[in-house]
Image (tube, rainbow, N blue to C red):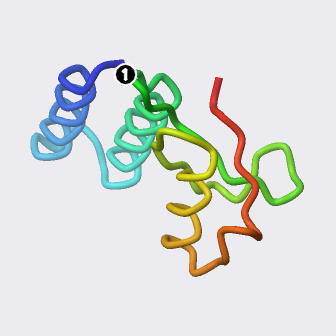
Amino acid sequence: MDRISAIRNVEDALRAFEAGEADLAETERRVNTVLRTFATEFEAPGKRAYRATDGTERGDGTVVVAESPAEARERVGALTDREPADVDVVPIE
C-alpha cells in the first residue's frame, strides 16, 4: 500500500465516523489496519520496516523504518528507552 492509498483509506474511515456510519472503536480498528498494512508493505529505496523482537514471534509491537538493522535498533531504543544493544530486530517480509 502506498502513502496515497493509506491516506485515502484513513479519510474513508474518518468520513464514515463523521457520518455516523461507524463508531470510534470501528474507526480505530480501520485506521490501525491501514497503518499496519502500510508498515508491512513499506517500500522505499534503501529503507525497510523492522519489528523489535522480545523473544516471541510477534515481538513487542514496535515497528520502525530504517536503512539497516543497526539503525532500526537505535530507533527502537530511542522510542522505548531501551539500550540499542538490548534490542533485537527482524525485517518485516
Observer-nearest of 37 and 27: 37
Is residue 89 shown above or below 16?
Answer: below
Q: Position of residue 81 (x, y in %)?
A: 57, 81
Is residue 58 shown above or below 21?
Answer: below
Is residue 62 shown above or below 7?
Answer: below
Relative to 41, 60 lies left or right: right
Write the residue at 65% across / 68% down.
84
Name the residue beneath numbered marker 1. Answer: 45
How many numbered marks does the figure carry?
Answer: 1
Observer-nearest of 47 and 33: 47
Mark 1 falls on what kind of element? loop
Q: Position of residue 73 (x, y in %)?
A: 62, 58
Quadrant in which the C terminus appears: top right
Quadrant in which the N terminus appears: top left
Q: Give the crowd class for mark 1: few <14, some 14-19, many >=20 residues within 10 Å.
A: few
Observer-nearest of 45 and 76: 45
Write the residue at 50% across / 73% down.
78
Write the residue at 65% across / 34% down.
91
Observer-nearest of 48 and 46: 46
**Rendering quarter of residue 83:** bottom right
**Rendering quarter of residue 43:** top left
Q: Position of residue 11 (x, y in %)?
A: 15, 34
Q: Amino acid at mark 1?
A: Pro
Relative to 58, 75 lies left or right: left
Relative to 83, 55 lies left or right: right
Residue that lies at the very extreme toward the right in this rendered image:
55
Is residue 48 shown above or below 55?
Answer: above
Residue that lies at the very extreme toward the bottom in this rendered image:
81
Write the residue at 58% across / 56% down.
62
